[in-house]
Image (cartoon, grey):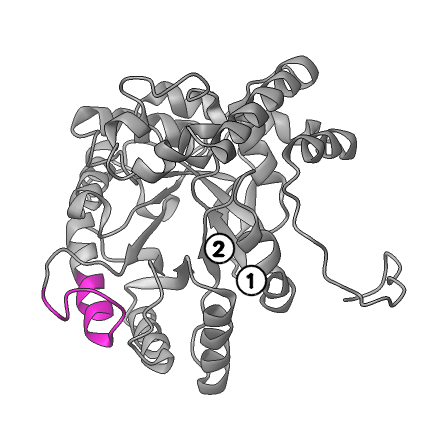
């Protein structure tokens, strides 16, 4: 790589361990889904990544499928042009869909995991990534093959850790059992959707995994694809995500005209009033802080099409300490989406020092 031009300064960014690993990741990170290499190319990509890096964000997430590989290419190019030290960075990418239509050009076969990883590194222009994710589960491949292949990638030094994305708790559990049985590397994190309107899987289904394996989450869509910014309260603005990717979000856009969607918009309006009147922030900052406050969240992946969006989203860090139990209760009163606790079947609850 080229000479280092920029020294990393974490500023006031808090860091957390990624699941059970020793890897420290920033509470807020930056992702390339739908933006970097897609709707945003060239110098604007550099501007966005530089602003993020200059403000304590050193974790950048991408995938082979993002913009058909262009996201990885743009990210790798910018890292070189900015002269960022590789050891200062946490780079994550994901495998599953591949870029071609051949029978072995996707999925989680040993063949695609190994060949796909090599291609990801070529596009990024890097010798290794910090974490490589299985972008989706693959029911057609034995779990032992999947675990062995990712373990091999780690042994080769192409990645330090592996993780999952949008896997069920059952599938994560199976991977853990296979890894333990064979003495291989197990997944350390799950990249899942988690926001005020999407809670069942991250808060209930994964609940046993957090304690059993110290699983951490790298959250995407913390703003519900922009719904929790309030921008869609009165329709679909031109140039917005729902407008620019209308076919991808068609189902979501259509749902906003129905009873369930209109109810969500009303909740966003109530959350907006709470954020502005009691916390002195925007509903965007509140929604990001709410996800970051969850103890199982390792990092919240931001999406941005402009540097100004990164700077604005960073204000969520100031809101996290303001989310007192009283405020959290008020949020729950508005949302009415809290997941049910683990049933006790009539047995008395353990005290606060008891272990579940």
**Span shown in magenta:** 102-118
The label on residue 23 is 2
**Residue ID at (36%, 32%):** 253
Which is more foreground, mark 2 or mark 1? 1
Does the segment drawn in magenta span residue 54?
Answer: no
Mark 2 falls on what kind of element? loop
Judged left or right of residue 212, residue 250 is left
Q: Answer few, some or many: residues within 10 Å of disc 2's Cα (few below 14, many 20 plus, some between 14 and 19).
A: some
Name the residue furthest bottom: 181
Name the residue furthest front: 259
Residue under circle 1? 20
Does the segment drawn in magenta span residue 111?
Answer: yes
Q: Is residue 146 above or below residue 59?
A: below
Instruction: Report the quarter where the C terminus lies.
Output: bottom right
Q: Is residue 188 above or below residue 12?
A: below
Judged left or right of residue 3, residue 175 is right
Residue 7 in view here: no
Q: Position of residue 335 (x, y in %)?
A: 63, 34
Q: Is residue 313 above or below residue 102?
A: above
Judged left or right of residue 173, residue 152 is left
- Compare residues 242 and 169 and report the one nearer the observer: 242
Q: Is residue 66 above or below residue 166?
A: above
Q: Position of residue 170 (x, y in %)?
A: 50, 71
Q: How many marks are shown on the rendered structure?
A: 2
């Amino acid at each position: 790589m080229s000479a280092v031009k920029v020294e990393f300064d974490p500023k006031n960014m808090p860091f957390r361990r990624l699941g059970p690993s020793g890897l420290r990741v920033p509470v807020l990170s930056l992702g390339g889904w739908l933006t970097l290499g897609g709707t945003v190319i060239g110098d604007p990509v550099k501007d966005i990544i530089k602003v993020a890096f200059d403000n304590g964000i050193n974790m950048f997430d991408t995938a082979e499928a993002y913009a058909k590989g262009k996201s990885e290419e743009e990210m790798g190019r910018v890292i070189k042009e900015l002269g960022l030290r590789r050891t200062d960075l946490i780079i994550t990418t994901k495998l599953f869909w591949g870029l071609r239509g051949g029978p072995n050009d996707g999925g989680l076969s040993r063949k695609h995991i190994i060949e796909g990883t090599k291609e990801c590194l070529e596009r990024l222009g890097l010798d290794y990534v910090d974490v490589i994710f299985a972008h989706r589960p693959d029911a057609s491949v034995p779990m032992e093959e999947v675990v062995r292949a990712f373990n091999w990638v780690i042994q080769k030094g192409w990645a330090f850790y592996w993780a999952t994305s949008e896997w069920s708790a059952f599938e994560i559990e199976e991977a853990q059992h296979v890894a333990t049985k064979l003495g291989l590397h197990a997944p350390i994190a799950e990249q899942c959707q988690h926001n005020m309107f999407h809670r069942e899987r991250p808060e209930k289904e994964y609940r046993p995994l957090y304690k059993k394996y110290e699983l951490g989450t790298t959250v995407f869509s913390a703003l519900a694809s922009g719904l929790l910014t309030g921008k869609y309260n009165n329709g679909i603005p031109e140039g917005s995500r729902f407008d620019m990717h209308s076919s991808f979000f068609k189902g979501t856009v259509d749902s906003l005209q129905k009873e369930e969607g209109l109810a969500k918009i009303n909740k966003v309006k109530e959350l907006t009033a709470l954020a502005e009147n009691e916390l002195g922030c925007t509903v965007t900052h509140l929604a990001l802080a709410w996800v970051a406050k969850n103890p199982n969240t390792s990092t919240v992946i931001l999406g941005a099409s402009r540097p100004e969006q990164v700077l604005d989203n960073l204000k969520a860090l100031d809101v996290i300490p303001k989310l007192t139990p009283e405020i959290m209760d008020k949020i729950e009163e508005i949302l009415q989406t809290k997941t049910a606790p683990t049933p006790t079947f009539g047995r008395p609850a353990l005290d606060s020092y008891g272990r579940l």
